[in-house]
Amino acid sequence: MKYLYSIIFMLLILFTHSSWTQADEFRGHTITDTFDGVKSVYAADIDGDGDVDILGAAEKAGAIAWWENDGNQIFTKHTIIENVETFGGAISVYAADVDSDGDVDILGAAKDADVIAWWENNGNQQFTKHIIDDAFNGAWAVLTIDMDDDGDVDILGAAYYADDIAWWKNDGSQNFTKHIIASNFDGARGVYAVDIDRDGDIDVLGAGFTADIIAWWENDGSESFAEHVLTFNFDGAIAVYATDIDGDKDIDILGAASNADVIAWWENDGHQNFTEHILVEEFNGAKSVYATDIDNDGDVDILGAASNADDIRWWENDGSQNFTEHTLIDDFDGAWAVYLMDIDSDSDVDILGAAANDDSIIWWEHIRTPIPGDVSGDWTLSEYDAALILQYVVGLIDTFPVESIDSPSSGAPRDYELRLPNLTQATTEKIYVPITINDTTGLVAGSICLQYNPAILKAVDVLPTIKLKGSYWDANTERPGEVRFAFATAEPTGGGGNLLIIEFEVLPNTEGHVSPLTLADVNLSNSMAITTIHGSLTVLPLRTALLQNYPNPFNPETWLPYQLAEPVFVVIKIYNAYGQIVRAFRVGHQEAGSYITPDQAAYWDGRDNYGEIVASGIYLYALHAGNFTTVRRMILVK
């Protein structure tokens, strides 16, 4: 019994003082090494038998083929087309139910034949070819999306020589009408579609190889598109993809640049303002980029292929968009394309790659060795495992989830909400920050990381509340900028309230500064439905003061910052050099705090009380805060 309890304590300490997750290993399996010049790879259940089949496009062979999975990852090749005259330069392959008849059809693009085509599956994997466009000069990429939200599958493509991004509207009977999105997108090679701006319609992204551009086209809802360029300097832009990289619920953009040897991602601030982040800049001949949660830790990792480096690599995201590089293979001659899919149906993500010079398609099986103590079976060692061990010890459960599909006694995952307050405190004082939960029903385990600004605050202690009575817990306040806390219990309580309280010291000389209080890496009984509401701590000024206006000198507008040591009624007056009042602002009652930024400070537009523009010269501005008054000087220069 003591041994089991020591395991519980060890698991809690591991979470609060370190991070222990399963190392990810991959084992390669060759599907083909004779598919001449293969440059595209995809995966889907082509034959509807419940397992994942593989598709490829071979440029030199002019071929589209698929490999049937027998359920044990033994693959049999089926050729859709192999004809360099009618489908020469086959360079892209995709699969979707184009005709909405319940089976999976196949699409392809051939750059030398200038063709976009689809092959209709009759349900028995007998395919009939249909030409969508046979004059799409340098057809380089193809995919499907319901562009116009009419319930049928439309086609999207990029043409390298035509410099076109286009889509073909499906009328519901697989008659397709072409619509040009961009007609002068030099060297169009990459294309993707997703709702970038979250307005309910599908936007389009593109990579322009000759133009060195990554761009996206905003759909107005009527399939009229407005171009937005992310970068003009992405040398040899060849691939583009989009997903939520940073977990903030908006869509970020990824790109690969073949000549620059770069993979980058652009962070969306939620208003479609994008900040570039270089992931790697020595990835020789970068050709492909894709992203998903490869290691099953809840954040999005990135995968790429580089043809000159002969590499496939993936970059592990630590949850804060710090990426660790892992090389999957470094001798995959002409590595060109990558894709991610659970090939062997074992609930983890496998990797699929194609190498043009090796003529090869390989899939890498994701290998995971069970972690001692991972009784939940989620491939991590966490406080939740401690809670399950505790429940087992006291007889509340008879088996662990890793051994059975039965749920633990806490029942199905609940919707939890954690909240931090917005607080104020004076410098050098202590402050107690509560973390509040809406309901602790079914809460048998939890782990929480609270992040703060260590230049403003110092964490001193963690105090669990009555909600955690009887729990085993541990905390770590030793890391500057974060507090980690984990707990496990056999008998959860119920109701809402303060879950724990964190004691901070407000550091000296921080008056007027604000520290965000952010909840990160939260896990509550392995629930996926957790809402976190962040807070802040504003350090109050020790004294009331009027600060220097900015800009100074100014023309014609300026801001007048100040700070208040206590709640007070505020009036600001502006005088000319003769002591006459030019303008007065009755700001009103304000709480103690710093009013420094443009949205907080008093604003003067250079006009008097009658709306007239005042002359150049020296002006005085006075702060009247209760019984406190002070004056400063400023200069208006025209």
Image (cartoon, rainbow, N blue to C red):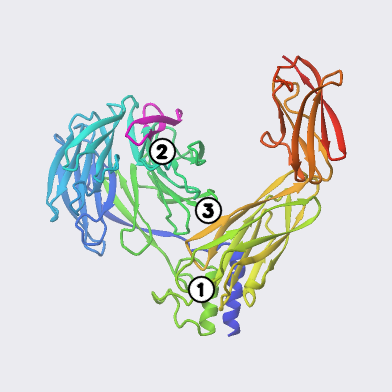
Residue 448 visible here: yes
Q: Residues within 10 Å of mark 3 (few under 14, many from 20)?
A: some
Which of 606/100 is in front?
A: 606
Q: Is residue 553 left or right of residue 15?
A: right
**Crowd tier of the residue under label 2, counting other residues whose Cα lies within 10 Å: few below 14, some 14–19, many 20 or above:** many
Q: Position of residue 273 (x, y in %)?
A: 50, 36
Mark number displayed over residue 319: 3
Please give left or right for residue 391 compared with residue 80 in the image: right
Mark drawn on residue 524: none
Instruction: Report, in whole angstroms, how far the alpha carbon at label 3 lies from the one at label 1.
Output: 23 Å
Quadrant in which residue 204 is drawn: top left
Q: Which residue is mark 2?
A: 256
Mark 2–mark 3 Cα distance, whole angstroms, equals 22 Å
Q: Amino acid at mark 3?
A: Gly
SS state under label 3: loop
Left/right placement of residue 316 relative to residue 630 reads: left
Marks 2 and 1, the one that precedes in the sequence? 2
Tell me the kind of residue under disc 2: Ala
Query: Which one is earlier in the sequence, the residue at label 2 or at label 3?
Result: 2
Q: Quadrant of residue 592?
A: top right
Q: Is residue 221 magenta?
A: yes
